[in-house]
Amino acid sequence: MPDVKTKSRVSEIWELLETVHDPEVPVLTVVDLGVVREVREIESGIEVVITPTYSGCPAMNVIEINIKMALATAGYPNVAVRTVLSPAWTTDWMSEAGKQKLKAYGIAPPRGAAVDKSLLFAEPKRVPCPRCDSFDTKMVSEFGSTACKAHYQCNSCLEPFDYFKCL
Amino acid sequence: MNPPTPLFSYILRQADNVLILGQRLSEWCGHGPILEQDIALTNFALDLIGQARSLYQYAAEVEGKGRSEDDLAYLRDGFDFYNVLLVELPKGDFGHTMTRQFFFDAYNYYFYQQLQKSSDPTLAAIAEKSIKEVTYHLRYSSEWMIRLGDGTEESHRRMQTAVDALWAYTGELYTPDAIDQELLAAGIAVDLGRLQQHWQQRVREILTAATLDIPTETWMQKGGKQGRHTEHLGYVLAEMQYLQRTYPNSEW
Ligand SMILES: [Zn+2]
């Protein structure tokens, strides 16, 4: 039978992680983003397993530090953060709550499956405007301010916006 | 000092490939033809340098001599770098950069595709992560090959010039040596013979669609994988390593 105390400690850590935000998309927590894969008790304390969104994502170091700080402040000084690469992160792991938060923040959340990335000259994905919900939008640039975003503009309300790309 | 193990050298080769190309791509930062390409090339640079970090971390662990990923990137000399010559060549014009990128992406894609099946779980995990990014790179550079090759007279001329100039540097991508063969037998390394077939098929397909002539030259440059480089690598390293060499252990 699982130790009740252990179980509650792990779920408490998960709750604390809900307060750690992504430094580049601060409206999302690391749990919303789906980068926290596992929390478990180990001999030396607590281990939090995370996975990067993109290989070169510069936010990962900051996320690791922020996780340790948040848990230390809450009374967990001995926290090890381990990074794993497999299984590789996908936008499918982003929570529904996270997607709603993104939209409210003005970033169009990832929609459905990723476009076939090997297909040449594929039509860009139709993405609704986070401001007025119109589908009459156009992709301005496949690349945006961070590796995870593309740049769009709404033809109906003229709002320029970021789209969180599927991966 | 003991010679490096084949596994250590094998990891370094790919790590150096993606680090040096990432460094070359970074030279476009603020110089892209338009903003989108500027951001695209720097995004690719970031992906490649990210892959390099994972590989250097693993190489450092395999070596077990207390060196870090930063030591491997910043404190080795040119003859201790094992990247293919293709990635260290100067960036040239946008067409030249795209042609080099396309030749390398086609290699990188089929390399990681096979490496996902490696018996070495860390290399397989790095490959699984990286191929998502590289799939994107390969599509992008393939599209630009076609757009510029089958574009205006001037863009066509520049692309053909780039293809002809870089062709002799592509053989090294798929030519195995003793390290490749030893690790292939162990189930760790990629089968470069198979990679060559995929690479040539893809390149033929895209160059044909781009109305570009496929060079018939069969003589190929080599040496990078064994640490024998062109003069160009020195300039890349001088710029990249300057800070750590001049102010050892500096951090910010
Ligand atoms: Zn709108």
Image: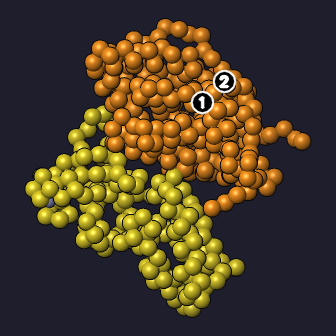
Q: Which residue is mark 1?
A: B88
Please state which amino acid type lies under the numbered disc 1: Glu
Q: Earlier in the sequence, mark 2 or mark 1?
A: 1
Q: Position of residue B237 (x, y in %)?
A: 66, 38
The residue pinned by badge 2 equals B230
Which residue: 27% across, 18% down?
A: B152
Above or below, B129 against A129 in this view is: above
User: Disc 2, disc 1: CB below 8 Å?
Assistant: yes
Q: Is residue B220 above or below residue B101?
A: above
Instruction: Count every numbered label the image shows and give the total.
Output: 2
- The amino acid beneath tag 2 is Thr
Secondary structure state at the residue bearing disc 1 = helix
Q: Chain of mark 2?
A: B
B49 left or right of B70? left
Alpha carbon of mark 2 to alpha carbon of mark 1: how far?
8 Å
- Tell me the yellow chain: A
Residue at 51%, 16% in the rendered image: B165
Q: Name the outermost residue toward the left.
A: A156
